[in-house]
């Protein structure tokens, strides 16, 4: 029986070709667009860039985006921990349905989610007359933006924490209870330290998604300049106004936030692995 001898030159060539293809595609698909954003944003100088960022409408868009993220992320952290704990530690009717429900936002288009909220909370929606009678406005206001953003970001924390809780088991928590720890002490001293890196990882992903959400927010916000337009929506408005420099300046803020999220994500991945 003959054995096929590998050609040393061919063995060295294949990895180099694969690395070359990967680097080329990364440069074309990722690096070039990012570089172009910053090149256009600073194309007319620092003063024009700063003036575009300090425009009242842009400042309001940044502020609104930050407020939405500050509301959504803590709520989703609490929801993710509670959902993961319930699924990992208890057996109850409908457990599999809960797991499936957590994943639903990943399979539904954000635009569809926005339309559903509009048909539910809008003036002509199911709850619209009651909301209007009680002088409560959900659509085309901050509550609607928060609700749809919360929907699209709901799975991120839960799906990071749940596998870790399932793999770790509940032995340490049961031992803590046996030694007299209260429920809060068990969570703070045993559960939370064991899941902290997965929790932070999920929070970073949730934040990045909340800041960059466009489709669902565009439906429920009304995209009112200076009132209900978040930063992604504001970029579109500036492009429609033919203000390319201002649009790229606003887009550079989103890009910087995404890059920061990627760096934090890489650090947390390393800590999780360790």
Image: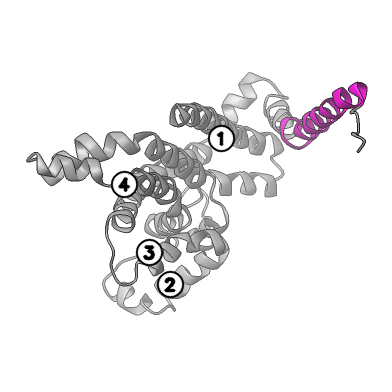
Q: Earlier in the sequence, mark 4 or mark 3?
A: 3
Q: Earlier in the sequence, mark 1 or mark 3?
A: 3
Instruction: Find the distance from the CA under tag 3 to the CA under tag 2.
Output: 7 Å
Instruction: Find the distance from the CA under tag 2 to the CA under tag 4.
Output: 44 Å
Crowding at mark 3 (Cα within 10 Å: few <14, some 14-19, many 20+): many
Instruction: Find the distance from the CA under tag 1 to the CA under tag 3.
Output: 29 Å
Residue 21 in the magenta stretch? The answer is: yes
What's the mark number on residue 122?
A: 2
Q: Earlier in the sequence, mark 4 or mark 1?
A: 4
Quickly name the residue at label 1. 258
Identify the residue at image location x=51%, y=50%.
229
Instruction: Find the distance from the CA under tag 1 to the CA under tag 2.
Output: 32 Å
Dots 1, 3 in contact, CB < 8 A: no
Quickly name the residue at label 3. 138
Which of labels 4 and 3 is toward the front? 4
Identify the residue at image location x=49%, y=43%.
211
Residue 258: x and y in percent read 56, 35
Instruction: Find the distance from the CA under tag 4 to the CA under tag 1.
Output: 34 Å
């Amino acid at each position: 029986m003959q054995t096929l001898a590998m050609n040393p030159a061919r063995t060295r060539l294949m990895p180099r070709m694969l690395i070359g293809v990967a680097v080329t595609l990364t440069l074309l698909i990722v690096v070039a667009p990012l570089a172009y954003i910053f090149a256009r944003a600073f194309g007319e100088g620092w003063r024009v860039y700063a003036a575009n960022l300090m425009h009242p409408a842009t400042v309001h868009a940044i502020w609104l985006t930050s407020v939405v993220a500050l509301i959504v992320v803590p709520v989703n952290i609490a929801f993710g921990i509670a959902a993961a704990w319930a699924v990992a530690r208890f057996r109850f009717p409908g457990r599999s349905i809960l797991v499936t429900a957590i994943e639903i936002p990943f399979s539904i288009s954000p635009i569809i989610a926005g339309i559903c909220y509009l048909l539910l909370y809008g003036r002509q929606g199911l709850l619209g007359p009651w909301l209007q009678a009680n002088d409560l406005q959900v659509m085309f206001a901050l509550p609607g933006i928060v609700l749809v953003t919360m929907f699209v970001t709901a799975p991120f924390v839960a799906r990071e924490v749940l596998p870790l809780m399932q793999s770790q088991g509940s032995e340490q928590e049961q031992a803590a209870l046996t030694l007299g720890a209260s429920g809060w002490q068990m969570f703070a001293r045993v559960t939370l330290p064991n899941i902290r890196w997965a929790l932070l990882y999920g929070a970073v992903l949730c934040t990045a998604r909340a800041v960059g959400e466009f489709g669902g927010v565009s439906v429920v916000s009304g995209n009112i300049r200076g009132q209900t337009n978040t930063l992604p929506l504001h970029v579109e408005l500036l492009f429609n106004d033919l203000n390319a420099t201002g649009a790229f300046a606003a887009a550079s803020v989103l890009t910087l936030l995404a890059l920061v999220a990627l760096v934090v994500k890489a650090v947390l991945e390393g800590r999780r692995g360790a």
